[in-house]
Image (tube, rainbow, N blue to C red):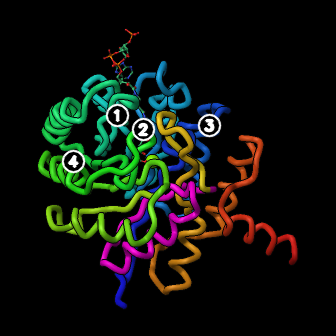
């Protein structure tokens, strides 16, 4: 089996991680979190979203987060944007990269952003065009690639259609999201294989939630197919407010432990990620859900 020599990790905890928490984390703590993730060596970090604060109050203040952040040269700070209003706010905050998103499931699209998938693709296309015209990089997400909380199974044709549409509108990378974490490796492989017939695999990323404990196994299945970009969240934080039952993202610590064991380079310090993941989890009143973060803590206590 041959794997990519290095894997790029897209850290999504400050957005996908915090957007679904009952406790809202304040601006200065969100800033500190992002700075600590950067210090750990993460260089692509989704810092928040410019969505309606009525829909997702946890992400209110993303502009303040970006304003207060001490930016490290070379680090890509990205934000999620649902429409042109969000893009305007992102531009005012001086972002160099945004992420747009659309769902392979019609019902999820309605629940998540109050419009059909086609309507959302049309909005996202306008957003992408306007962003690219200003030299802002655009990344894309497809949601519900392995199942939907409202519809159950989703056809690979629907997933491929949305992924190809996002790539076609200029997304440099399309992240395939198992929004509710129901996938298993064989399904993940079949999905990636189908999508990769339409979008080159070097423009694809994996975004697994860990609801059923399958995220790491799914990532491994995708790495075996040559994928080299993976989204994850420190502490295994995360979920989607409009995906009932969706638990955290794949934990960055778990991913790092596996990649290190496979001699795949990431340039990221597991201990530093675990430390900041613990700090945020404690602010949220719990432990990280990451097994590696728990083992890291136990190994330090045993010293
Ligand atoms: P809507 O109600 O249809 O929008 O919501 P609207 O255009 O009718 O506007 C309604 C109100 O929202 C207005 O304010 C607008 O100004 C305001 P009001 O007049 O009532 O005071 N508004 C905005 N405010 C701030 N920023 C904006 C914005 N746009 C409108 N950009 C909308 C449509 C998309 C806004 C709404 O549905 C929304 O914000 N949804 C949030 C969706 C979200 O953040 N979901 C989670 C992220 S997706 C995800 O987690 C999956 C992913 O991780 C991948 C995976 O796991 O699969 C990416
Ligand atoms: Mg997600």
Which secondary structure lies at badge 1? Answer: helix
Q: Is residue 211 left or right of residue 157?
A: right
* Front tag of 1 and 4: 1
Image location (x, y in percent) of residue 203: 23, 63
Q: Name the residue under label 3.
A: 21
Q: What is the spatial separation of the Cα atoms under label 1 and label 4, in whole angstroms?
A: 14 Å
Residue 233 located within the stretch drawn in magenta = yes
Residue 37 against residue 9 in the figure, above or below:
above
Image quadrant in which you'd find residue 156: bottom left
Q: What residue is shown with label 4?
A: 162
Query: For the C terminus, which image quadrant?
Result: bottom right
Question: Mark 2 or 3, which is nearer the eye?
Answer: 2
x and y percentages locating residue 152 in the rendered image:
40, 46
Callout in the foreground (3, 4): 4
* Callouts 1 and 4 close, C-beta under 8 Å: no
Q: In this view, does 205 lie to the left or right of 67?
A: left
Q: What distance separates the C-alpha of mark 4 from that of mark 2?
A: 18 Å
**Between disc 1 and disc 4, whose residue precedes?**
1
Residue 130 visible (yes or no): no
Image coordinates of residue 66 in percent, x first then y, are 46, 36
Where's the N terminus, which quadrant? bottom left
Pointer 1 residue: 107
Q: Pointer 1 and pointer 2: residues touching (CB < 8 Å)?
A: yes
Q: Name the residue at 16% across, 42% down.
A: 132
How would you rate the neighbour count of disc 2 (Cα within 10 Å): few for under 14, some for 14-19, many for 20 or more? few
Residue where numbered disc 2 is placed: 150
Which mark is first along the chain, 2 or 4?
2
Alpha-carbon span between mark 1 and mark 3:
23 Å
């Amino acid at each position: 089996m041959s794997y990519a020599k290095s894997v790029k990790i897209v850290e999504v905890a400050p957005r996908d991680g915090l957007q679904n928490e009952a406790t809202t984390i304040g601006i200065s703590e969100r800033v500190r979190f992002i700075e600590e993730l950067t210090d750990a060596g993460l260089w692509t970090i989704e810092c928040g979203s410019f969505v309606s604060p009525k829909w997702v109050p946890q992400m209110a203040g993303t502009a303040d987060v970006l304003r207060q952040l001490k930016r490290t040269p070379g680090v890509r700070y990205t934000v999620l944007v649902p429409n042109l209003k969000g893009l305007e706010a992102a531009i005012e905050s001086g972002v160099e990269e945004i992420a747009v998103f659309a769902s392979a499931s019609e019902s999820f699209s309605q629940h998540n952003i109050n419009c059909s998938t086609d309507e959302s693709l049309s909005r996202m296309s306008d957003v992408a065009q306007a962003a690219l015209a200003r030299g802002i990089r655009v990344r894309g997400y497809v949601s519900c690639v392995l199942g939907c909380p409202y519809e159950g199974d989703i056809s690979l044709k629907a997933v491929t259609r949305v992924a190809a549409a996002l790539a076609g509108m200029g997304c440099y990378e399309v992240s395939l999201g198992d929004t509710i974490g129901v996938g298993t490796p064989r399904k993940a492989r079949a999905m990636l294989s189908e999508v990769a017939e339409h979008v080159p695999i070097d423009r694809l990323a994996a975004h697994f939630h860990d609801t059923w404990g399958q995220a790491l196994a799914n990532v491994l299945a995708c790495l075996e197919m040559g994928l080299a970009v993976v989204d994850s969240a420190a502490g295994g934080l995360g979920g989607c407010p409009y995906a009932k039952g969706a638990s955290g993202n794949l934990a960055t610590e778990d991913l790092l432990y596996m990649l290190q064991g496979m001699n795949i380079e990431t340039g990221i310090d597991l201990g530093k990620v675990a430390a900041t993941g613990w700090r945020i989890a404690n602010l949220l009143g719990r432990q990280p859900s990451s097994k590696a973060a728990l083992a890291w803590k136990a190994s330090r206590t045993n010293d």
